[in-house]
């Protein structure tokens, strides 16, 4: 089904056609063709080799890990892996490009046709699941950085990024709304992080998108597209599409023509503008880099790449539903980010050990606790899951205390808060603060009797058929026992007394 | 004591090792010869102190009883295309004038490790583009040779013309060269010395200013086949810093030298009998055939059908690669910067490159830019690379019939300075016999074969199968022994 | 295909080589002479022939992902990198201000 996203113009409704070229920094210690480090945030030009500075006579030697990560990424999107590929030079002059060319792949990319599935999201206007085509992934060098505001008449050049390995992941123009583009980017980012081929950190520039947008009336051929360069967050990509689509509709409806051009996104205003400095007629004079030979991958290399692939989000989600019996919502939440899935699986494993039960039996409890308790508590305390003071092991200890009936669910909330503040073990907190659950039937019976005696009208109403009041009585008993009573025993006793 | 500058690599090395003279004496003699030869303009910079330092190291190693390297005590010239740490490296261009590398090329490092010392950086055609040494920003080199009865200055060949002139004039026993389309063989041939370009990938390109990456190959120049073998053995070897370096052990070429060609088949390519080749060249080729037959070889007629197309293919491929390789000379990180008042970044590039590149370099950069540009790429570059496949295939077919190929090195003897300068095409045609082996990446060597009527040297070229430098050296040795070439230029400088 | 002044001007701009009138007057005929000569390549039948992709028949060697394994190709050599710079300040290369 087509997307329902439309730009409402003066002359009618316009469809939007979107393709994304995502540049993702390959996770590697050293650069694509030199031994200089890739770490973010170094002193200017501290991570630059003679090769990266394009000194006379310097030559590139390819980093195996960068190729391995790109191949694994290709496998993760079920793309064709080209066992024979090669590097080309893309020639142009710019101060951030020391060689005067970027080593990239045009004619024979490493990874060919693949695809990526985005899920239906009614709230976002994505009516159903959709497969977005990926045309290719090629490997190339990043450029350096220009700083314009440090000197009145000069720009400063820092080559630390120069030569860092990038994967350029080129989608088909298969997206039809900002929401679809956003979903695609988020999904792609998740896959890269699962695979471990890119940290997906958009703020540090590890991932950025060139956004190709065109508009057309329904049924008409593709319009002329513009390319908005280097947009570095999912939100900005969506804004850039929104703005660019509207701008194009306005231009066309005013009788104008869309110029195929490179544009720049301004996050401040959420608008795009033409990039005059790059308007120079592009003629990159691509040709095979004669400093490098064709790249040929053998079966053993490909086998290792395949074998080292982790379970990917879609497969994981399906397994959480079928094997662990999780709701599709919970399964989706837990698999959206690799950190969440890793945390959940560690929690489940530790719980199974602590409680001596199979994981499938504990999965729902663990999932619910993680999603409704821990996420909320972390959020309140301003923590991300990655830097949670509560480890999966401690979480499992807490769940075991609930599972064994040592504490109640509501007490568990209280204990969790203390755990987040102090980092202490849950058992120690329960012990110290005297939070052990009361399961003694006698004490609970006494409390039940007191509550019934104190609420004769409610008791009458209940007996008169107002079943809902059962919960009221449970709550009153629990309060009378400072929340420490075993809710199951309260239920049983109440049922008997009210029976 | 005899004049040490007349000695070759082997004689110096053995003399130093045997205590007949000291390495310092050799270095001093060569330094003096270099200092007196300003008129040849063979050196861009001289480094007498480096030659002395290396000599002293060799002498003290000897007196300490240490094992000496294969080039211990041998002072050599270094083509100014090799980056030398702490010594200006220019590729004979204005754009790199004053550039002092903070690194040493792999090949030069290997030579110093073998005990050689550096007399200086040798002049060349700018960025190795030329066949006469007239494109150097630092002035042309003069050949030490002169036509009988003439004072006209002759070209030493190019691009390794500083190397060829210095060796022929006995300023140094050996030097490095680089060969992209004939830049070792052509200058060697017309100055009466030996020069070998090994199989592409034998010598690391790391630290050599690039001209055309898929063709550039360092090699050795000296006055004898054996001296070339000794030099090349020290220069060659696997380098992980160069992706096109061959990961193969370097054979002991020198030890295995053998001038007996019994059982060997020598191919004579019929397409090399070209119109316009000097009669003297044809005669010397025929003489070479007779010599190799005499050495026991079987002579076979072979065909290299795409020979005529090798040169035009080369003049697409080499400029295309050069146009990209030379893009790094932009005035940002090193070398010349020309920043006219009010210029922006792109203006600075254009001004810097206009001021820093010579005419021939500009010509080739423009040709290369054109043949790679949109709309022309397939017609020129792709077509040339397909023709290159065919040229290489011709050789593969030939190896079914022969082991080594004998051909002239050049279509003519040395020409006068200025003679071909006005006509770029006429200059390009000087590489007609050397370019095919370059396109195919094959080892090839020029060895002196005699003199023409004007008393100028002529060279013969041996082309070998990939990695068979030994076959090339052996056949060259057979010619060397029979040619008995002892002529040397009369000193006028 | 022959080149005229306009085409040469376009190439020179792409190659970032400033040229004056005299340079065009020299260069246009020279380039045409060379191009006319190389165009004989069109005569060669290359049906089914692949362009040469490697001079030596060996696949590309791959390097281990190790930082600064060889000081000659590793980082941390800022002084060497900046040593020959026409303008270097505060650890950066300086170029005329670029307006993007
Ligand atoms: Mg792009
Ligand atoms: Zn890219």
Image (spheres, rainbow, N blue to C red):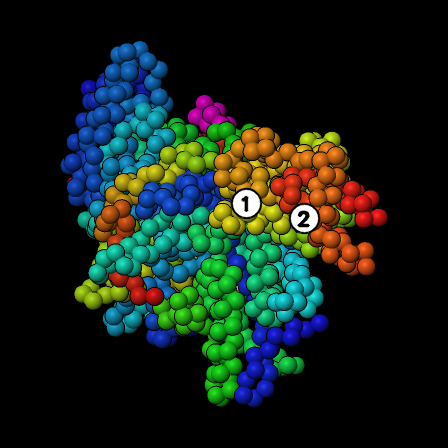
**Residue drawn at x 32%, y 46% as measured from the top left:** A44
Q: Is residue C79 magenta?
A: no
**Residue drawn at x 40%, y 49% as measured from the top left:** A161
> How many numbered callouts?
2
In this rendering, position of residue B134 left or right of residue A169: left
The residue indicated by pointer 2 is A476
Q: Residues within 10 Å of mark 1 (few under 14, many from 20)?
A: some
> Tag 1, which chain?
A
Q: Residues within 10 Å of mark 2 (few under 14, many from 20)?
A: some
Q: List x then y, in percent, for residue B108.
A: 34, 34
> Tag 2, which chain?
A
Q: List x then y, in percent, for residue B107.
A: 37, 35
Q: List x then y, in percent, for residue A310.
A: 65, 43
Q: Secondary structure at mark 1?
A: helix
**Residue drawn at x 27%, y 51% as measured from the top left:** C93
Q: Is residue B481 visible?
A: no
């Amino acid at each position: 089904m087509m997307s329902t996203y439309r730009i409402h113009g003066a002359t009618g409704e316009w469809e939007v056609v979107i393709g994304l070229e995502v540049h993702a920094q390959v996770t590697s210690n050293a650069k694509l063709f030199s031994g200089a480090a890739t770490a973010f945030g170094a002193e200017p030009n501290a991570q630059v080799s003679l090769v990266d500075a394009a000194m006379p006579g310097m030559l590139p030697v390819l980093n195996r890990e960068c190729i391995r990560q790109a191949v694994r990424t290709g496998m993760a999107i079920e793309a064709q892996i080209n066992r024979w590929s090669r590097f080309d030079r893309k020639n142009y002059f710019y101060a951030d490009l020391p060689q005067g060319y970027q080593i990239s792949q045009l004619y024979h990319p490493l990874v060919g046709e693949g695809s990526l599935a985005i899920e239906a999201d009614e709230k976002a206007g994505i009516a159903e699941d959709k497969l977005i085509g990926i045309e290719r992934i090629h490997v190339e060098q990043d450029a350096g950085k220009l700083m314009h505001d440090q000197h009145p008449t000069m720009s400063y050049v820092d080559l630390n990024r120069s030569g860092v390995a990038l994967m350029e992941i080129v989608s088909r123009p298969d997206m039809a709304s900002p929401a679809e583009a956003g979903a695609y980017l988020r999904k792609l980012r998740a896959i890269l992080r699962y695979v471990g081929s890119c940290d997906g950190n958009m703020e540090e520039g590890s991932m950025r998108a060139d956004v190709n947008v065109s508009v057309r009336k329904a049924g008409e051929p593709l319009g002329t597209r513009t390319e908005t360069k280097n947009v570095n967050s999912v939100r900005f990509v969506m804004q850039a599409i929104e703005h660019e689509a509207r701008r194009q509709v306005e231009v066309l409806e005013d009788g104008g023509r869309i110029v195929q051009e490179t544009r720049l996104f301004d996050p401040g205003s959420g608008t795009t503008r033409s990039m005059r400095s790059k308007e120079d007629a592009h003629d990159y004079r691509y040709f095979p880099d004669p400093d490098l030979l064709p790249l040929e991958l053998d079966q053993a290399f490909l086998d290792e790449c395949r074998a080292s692939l982790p379970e990917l989000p879609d497969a994981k989600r399906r397994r959480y539903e079928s094997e662990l019996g999780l709701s599709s919502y919970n399964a989706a939440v837990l698999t959206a980010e690799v950190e969440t899935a890793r945390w959940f699986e560690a929690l489940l494993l530790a719980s199974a050990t602590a409680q001596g039960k199979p994981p499938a039996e504990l999965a729902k409890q663990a999932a619910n606790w993680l999603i409704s308790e821990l996420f909320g508590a972390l959020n309140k305390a301003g923590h991300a899951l990655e830097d949670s003071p509560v480890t999966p092991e401690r979480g499992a200890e807490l769940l075991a205390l609930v599972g064994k009936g040592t504490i109640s669910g509501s007490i568990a909330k209280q204990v969790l808060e203390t755990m987040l503040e102090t980092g202490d073990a849950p058992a120690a907190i329960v012990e110290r603060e005297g939070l052990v659950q009361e399961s003694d039937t006698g004490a609970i019976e006494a409390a039940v009797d007191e509550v019934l005696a104190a609420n004769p009208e409610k008791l009458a109403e209940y007996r008169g058929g107002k079943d809902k009041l059962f919960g009221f009585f449970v709550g009153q008993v629990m309060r009378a026992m400072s929340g420490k009573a075993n809710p199951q025993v309260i239920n049983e006793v109440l049922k008997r007394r009210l029976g | 004591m005899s004049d040490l500058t007349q000695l070759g690599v082997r004689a110096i090395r053995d003399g130093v090792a045997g205590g007949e003279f000291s390495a310092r004496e050799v270095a001093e003699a060569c330094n003096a010869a270099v200092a007196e030869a300003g008129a040849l303009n063979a050196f861009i910079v001289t480094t007498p102190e480096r030659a002395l330092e290396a000599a002293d190291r060799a002498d003290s190693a000897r007196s300490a009883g240490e094992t000496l390297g294969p080039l211990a005590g041998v002072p050599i010239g270094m083509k100014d295309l090799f980056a030398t740490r702490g010594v200006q490296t220019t590729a004979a261009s204005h754009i790199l004038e004053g550039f002092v590398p903070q690194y040493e090329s792999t090949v030069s490092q290997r030579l110093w490790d073998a005990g050689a010392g550096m007399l200086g950086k040798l002049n060349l055609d700018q960025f190795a583009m030329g066949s006469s040494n007239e494109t150097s920003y630092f002035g042309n080199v003069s050949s030490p040779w002169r036509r009988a009865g003439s004072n006209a200055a002759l070209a030493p060949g190019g691009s390794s013309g500083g190397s060829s002139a210095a060796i022929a004039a006995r300023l140094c026993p050996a030097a490095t060269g680089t060969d992209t389309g004939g830049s070792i063989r052509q200058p060697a041939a017309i100055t009466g010395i030996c020069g070998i370009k090994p199989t592409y990938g034998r010598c690391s390109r790391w630290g050599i200013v690039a001209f055309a990456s898929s063709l550039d190959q360092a090699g050795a120049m000296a006055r004898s086949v054996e001296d070339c073998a000794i030099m090349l053995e020290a220069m060659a070897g696997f380098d992980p810093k160069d992706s096109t370096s061959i990961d193969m052990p370097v054979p002991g070429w020198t030890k295995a030298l053998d001038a007996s060609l019994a059982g060997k088949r020598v191919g004579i390519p019929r397409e090399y009998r070209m119109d316009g080749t000097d009669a003297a060249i044809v005669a010397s080729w025929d003489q070479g055939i007779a010599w190799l037959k005499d050495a026991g070889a079987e002579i076979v007629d072979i065909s290299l059908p795409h020979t005529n197309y090798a040169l035009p293919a080369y003049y697409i491929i080499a400029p295309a690669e050069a146009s990209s390789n030379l893009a790094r000379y932009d005035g940002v990180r090193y070398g010349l910067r020309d920043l006219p008042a009010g210029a922006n970044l792109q203006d600075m590039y254009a001004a810097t490159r206009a001021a820093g590149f010579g005419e021939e370099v500009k010509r080739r950069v423009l040709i290369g830019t054109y043949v790679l540009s949109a709309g022309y790429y397939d017609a020129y570059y792709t077509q040339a690379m397909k023709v290159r496949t065919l040229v290489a295939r011709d050789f593969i077919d030939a190896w079914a019939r022969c082991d080594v190929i004998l051909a002239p090195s050049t279509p003519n003897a040395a020409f006068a300075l200025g003679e071909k300068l006005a006509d770029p095409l006429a200059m390009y045609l000087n590489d007609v016999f050397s370019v095919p082996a370059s396109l195919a990446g094959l080892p090839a060597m020029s060895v002196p074969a005699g003199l023409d009527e004007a008393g100028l040297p002529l060279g013969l070229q041996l082309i070998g199968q990939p990695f068979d430098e030994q076959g090339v050296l052996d056949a060259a040795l057979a010619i060397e022994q029979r040619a008995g070439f002892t002529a040397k230029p009369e000193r006028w400088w | 295909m022959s080149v005229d002044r306009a085409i040469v001007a376009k190439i020179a701009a792409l190659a970032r080589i400033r040229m004056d009138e005299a340079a065009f007057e020299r260069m246009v005929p020279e380039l045409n002479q060379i191009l006319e000569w190389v165009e004989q390549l069109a005569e060669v039948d290359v049906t089914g022939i692949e362009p040469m992709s490697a001079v030596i028949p060996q696949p590309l060697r791959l390097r281990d992902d190790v930082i600064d394994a060889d000081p000659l190709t590793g980082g941390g050599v800022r002084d060497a990198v900046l040593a020959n710079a026409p303008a270097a300040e505060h650890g950066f290369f300086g170029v005329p201000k670029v307006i993007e």
